[in-house]
Image (cartoon, helix red, strand yellow):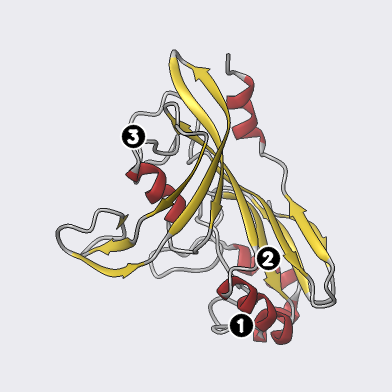
Amino acid sequence: MPSIIYETDDFVAVNKPAGLLVHKTAASEEETLVEWLLKKYPEIKTVGDDPENRPGIVHRLDKDTSGVILIARNQKFFEYLKNLFKTHQIKKTYLALVYGKLEPLTGVIEKPIALKSGTIKRTAHLGGKVRMVKEAITEYKVKKYLRLNSQDFSLVELFPKTGRTHQLRVHMASISHPIVGDRLYGRKNVNFDLERQFLHAESIEFSLPEGRRIKIEAELPLDLMKILDSAI
């Protein structure tokens, strides 16, 4: 179940579990974060650019990504957050486990991302039939190297500077360090008891209208913690 991390009259920060869709899609009728939110915060039903389908939702997380997501409780704050995202004034930090020893320890991945024609997959390789090509930038920082199941891995912090769909997953795969558990962009055979990608939205940091800086964090969930605990 989702849990509330932080709440004001203007917005709420939720720790979204993996396996939960943020909002309804044409391909799924399963329960969503939006439905859970509407029961607790019915005022959000008129908030947003598309309140009928995505009430209060300013940004999103993939279904199988856990962590912090912000929801606006009124239109004024929705517009405020939307502008912060648009002008890159919100710092988002993700934690990911990727295959191999990622070097150097810090870097920037600056590769446009496109949609592969006829699929839901994104790609940073722009040869062939692609559409909707958009700029995408991700900074990374290696926290530590790990040894698991006789293989090398890197625990990394990822800082998306743009907000493209599947951006972090596509970018890490594009440099031959796919995220563990990512069955769409990574390796098909996962040597862990993991039902999703090892990707967690660890924190969001931004300034409130009155100027105060705020950082909201979500603890690493147990399924991911167990994997790190098993490392050498």
Which of pointers 2 and 3 lies earlier in the amino acid sequence?
2
Q: Image point 29% across, 63% down: which residue?
A: 115
Residue that badge 1 annotates: 48
Q: Nearer the viewer, residue 139 or 67?
A: 139
Q: In which quadrant will I find the C terminus? A: top right
| Residue sitting at the far left | 128
Measuring from the top left, give residue 171's x and y in whole percent. 39, 49
Is 66 rendered above or below residue 70? above
Residue contact between numbered discs 1 and 3, judged by CB atoms under 8 Å: no
Residue picked out by circle 2: 70
User: For this rendering, which residue is in front, 174 or 53?
Assistant: 174
The answer to which of marks 1 and 2 sits earlier in the sequence is: 1
The CA distance from mark 1 to mark 3 is 37 Å
Label 2, label 3: how far apart the Cα atoms are: 31 Å
- Left or right of 109 in this view: 219: right
| Residue, disc 3 | 187
Residue 228 shown left or right of residue 41 in the figure: left
Give the residue drawn at x 51%, y 29%.
154
Distance CA(mark 1)–CA(mark 2)? 12 Å
Nearer the observer, 8 or 170? 170
Q: Amino acid at mark 3?
A: Arg
Residue 16 in the image, given as x and y percentages of width and height: 64, 54
* Helix, strand or loop at mark 2: strand
> On the rendered structure, is 117 left or right of 5?
left
Place of residue 109 in the rendered image (x, y in percent of width and height, measured from the top left) = 42, 50
Q: Earlier in the sequence, mark 1 or mark 3?
A: 1
Q: In the picture, residue 111 is in which quadrant?
A: bottom left
Is residue 50 shown to the viewer in this render?
A: yes
Q: Residues within 10 Å of mark 3 (few under 14, many from 20)?
A: some
Question: Badges 2 and 3: C-beta atoms under 8 Å apart?
Answer: no
In the rendering, at what x and y percent does residue 76 appear? 72, 86
